[in-house]
Image: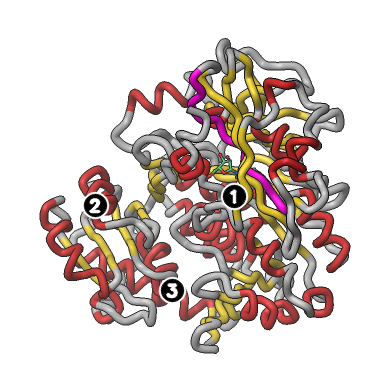
């Protein structure tokens, strides 16, 4: 038997060990496929020597480095389950994840070792190793071991990774991702987005998240292409890299920030593909990008639990404000939130997804899994969506962001779109906050275009065509919306900040 995911990641580079895989933007070094897989095998040797048996978890809270990618592949090779954690998590949060996932090994930043040693002990982690931003640490020191001769056999149903969801409401849950789900999804995207060994991807996304770890990394490996590997987003570094690259995968904030760069059009001339996802791309950003660079950004939609679910077409119209069509072999439907019945085209409901891309359930939470993963295999995403007349899917927001005011449903996206269309407005976020009469009332938080003045009164007076109950009862102008590292607007923070403005 073979190791399902490992074989898929290695297939395209077999016999091409001298081909470049990673251009390290920090050191200027080039890492070939041969060297990468040799290092990954050494990582698997370290884990094997620590007694890792198939199914054991390897948790990692470390800065983004190539060694961390080698650890990811090494974990897969030895049959382990890779569990990356956002470096922004506090020790208390890490303690929760370790206690919940019970990893055999925890790898942390050497700078955090003093704080996290006690936590690792309390949560009964057998081995604590370190891995720093410059690739030093006990993990890389230990890697001069003989790796096991062969990758451990793993079938498509075996677990490859656990990713904790961002958990903006309630406790974060560990989404269990199988070898089969990760392999099939990246292979589908590779074909759809035409990745080949000639591609050079700018890799500036974090690798604790599905976008940077699975979409960006797995696709590059499965295509046998190369990536310019950056520790984080840096507009200047990306501008320098663009002429040497063919593709960029980013969150919407990458694109808004790059639009401020004067040489963008010139530098992008050799690029073939810009992909955006993880948060909604503003229509305005899509249109400006196309005007400036001549490229239509390809927007796709997915989530930790489902990998990628829909994508705009590679050939054909990449429609701004939409996330395109369901991927091959993936069933997507828009359902009534109460009854689960499939709704008609044009109606707004909860998106449900079924296919080889969908996760295997939440770690240690069979009841939560049963609530969200139906017996017929459909996963209830919690995203509100609508299918437009041409079959393109549009994400309208999260169902938990739905505002119910005086018993009437209000979709924040509808109001945000109306506000965003007003002259002088860059973007907005609409939230529901407690209202003494109506239960909830609408509050709009608005960011003006740079160097532009706009007042709440002007905005309010321009929304007169909207039904009264939808009109914001309070409008605030702010410099920027709070966002997490994946570019998602943190509406929970806005709801806390403006909790009392209507009471
Ligand atoms: P995560 O699990 O962190 O990847 O977050 C997934 C969530 O991000 C989805 O459930 C959506 O709410 C949101 N999301 C991802 N891609 C898009 C997109 N292209 N447009 C709108 N929302 C998106």
Can you give x and y, in whole percent of width and height, for residue 264 in the image?
Answer: 78, 75
Is 153 positioned to the left or the right of 343 in the image?
A: left
Q: Nearer the viewer, mark 2 or mark 3?
A: 2
Residue 452 is inside the magenta segment: no
Query: Secondary structure under badge 1?
Result: loop
Say whether marks 1 and 3 touch (CB < 8 Å): no
The residue at which mark 1 appears reads as 278
Report whether the residue tagged 1 is closer than 8 Å to ligand 1.
yes
Circle number at residue 92: 2
Q: Is the magenta stretch mostly helix, strand or loop?
A: strand
Position of residue 354 relative to residue 291, above or below, is above
Cα separation between marks 2 and 3: 24 Å
Please state the extent of the stretch shown in magenta in the rendering. Answer: 426-436
Marks 1,2: beta carbons within 8 A: no
Indicate which disc, 2 or 3, sits on the residue closer to the N terminus.
3
Q: Where is residue 107, by image quadrant?
A: bottom left
CA neighbours of label 1 inside 10 A, class few (<14), some (14 to 19), many (20+): many
Looking at marks 1 and 2 on the same chain, the residue that comes earlier in the sequence is marked by: 2
Q: Position of residue 347 (x, y in %)?
A: 74, 20
Residue situated in front as seen by the camera: 13 or 478: 478
Q: Say which label, 1 or 3, has the lower sequence index.
A: 3
SS at circle 2: helix
Category of crowding for the residue at label 2, using alpha-carbon neighbours closer than 10 angstroms: few (below 14), some (14–19), many (at least 20): few
Residue at horizontal 38 percent and vertical 82 percent from the top: 134
Q: Is residue 130 left or right of residue 304?
A: left
The answer, for residue 192, to whether it is visible in the render is no
Q: How is the image coloured?
A: secondary structure
- Rendered image: mark on residue 7: none
Report which residue position mark 3 lands on. 65
Q: Which residue is drawn at 26% across and 81% down?
A: 141
């Amino acid at each position: 038997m073979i190791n399902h995911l490992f074989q898929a990641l290695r297939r395209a580079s077999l016999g091409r060990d001298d081909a470049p895989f990673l251009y390290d933007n920090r050191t200027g070094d080039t890492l070939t496929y041969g060297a990468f897989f040799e290092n990954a095998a050494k990582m698997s040797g370290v884990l094997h020597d620590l007694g890792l048996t198939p199914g054991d978890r390897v948790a990692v809270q470390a800065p983004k480095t190539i060694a961390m990618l080698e650890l990811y592949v090494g974990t897969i090779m030895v049959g382990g389950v890779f569990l990356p954690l956002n470096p922004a998590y506090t020790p208390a949060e890490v303690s929760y994840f370790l206690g919940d996932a019970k990893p055999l090994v925890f790898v942390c930043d050497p700078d955090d070792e003093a704080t996290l040693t006690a936590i690792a002990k309390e949560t009964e982690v057998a081995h604590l190793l370190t891995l720093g931003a410059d690739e030093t640490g006990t993990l890389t020191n230990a890697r001069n071991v003989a790796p096991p001769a062969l990758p451990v056999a793993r079938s498509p149903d075996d677990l490859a990774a656990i990713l904790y969801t961002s958990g903006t409401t309630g406790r974060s849950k560990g989404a269990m991702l199988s070898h089969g789900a990760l392999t099939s999804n990246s292979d589908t995207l590779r074909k759809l987005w035409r990745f080949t060994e000639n591609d050079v991807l700018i890799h500036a996304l974090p690798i604790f998240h599905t976008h940077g770890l699975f979409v960006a990394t797995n696709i590059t490996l499965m295509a046998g292409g190369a990536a310019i590997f950056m520790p984080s987003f840096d507009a200047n570094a990306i501008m320098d890299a663009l002429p040497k690259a063919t593709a960029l995968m980013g969150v919407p904030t990458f694109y808004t920030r790059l639009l401020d760069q004067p040489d963008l059009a010139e530098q992008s001339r050799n690029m073939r593909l810009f992909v955006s996802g993880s948060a909604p791309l503003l229509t305005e950003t899509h249109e400006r990008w196309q005007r400036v660079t001549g490229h239509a950004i390809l927007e796709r939609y997915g989530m930790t639990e489902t990998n990628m679910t829909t994508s705009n077409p590679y050939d054909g119209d990449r429609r701004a404000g939409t996330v395109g069509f369901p991927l091959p072999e993936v069933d997507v439907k828009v359902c009534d939130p109460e009854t689960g019945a499939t709704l008609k085209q044009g109606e707004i409901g909860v998106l449900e997804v079924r296919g080889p891309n969908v996760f295997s359930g939440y770690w240690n939470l069979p009841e939560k899994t049963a609530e969200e993963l139906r017996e017929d295999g459909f996963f209830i995403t919690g995203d509100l969506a609508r299918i437009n007349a041409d079959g393109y899917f549009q994400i309208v927001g999260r169902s938990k962001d739905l505002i119910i005011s005086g018993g009437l449903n209000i979709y924040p996206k509808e109001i945000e779109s109306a506000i965003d269309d007003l002259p002088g407005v860059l973007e907005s976020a609409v939230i529901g906050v407690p209202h003494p009469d109506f239960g909830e009332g609408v509050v709009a938080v608005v960011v003006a275009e740079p160097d532009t003045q706009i007042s709440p009164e002007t905005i309010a007076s321009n929304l007169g065509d909207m039904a009264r109950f939808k009109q914001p009862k309070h409008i605030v102008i702010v410099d920027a919306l709070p966002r997490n590292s994946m570019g998602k607007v943190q509406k929970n923070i806005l709801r806390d900040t403006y909790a009392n403005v209507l009471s």
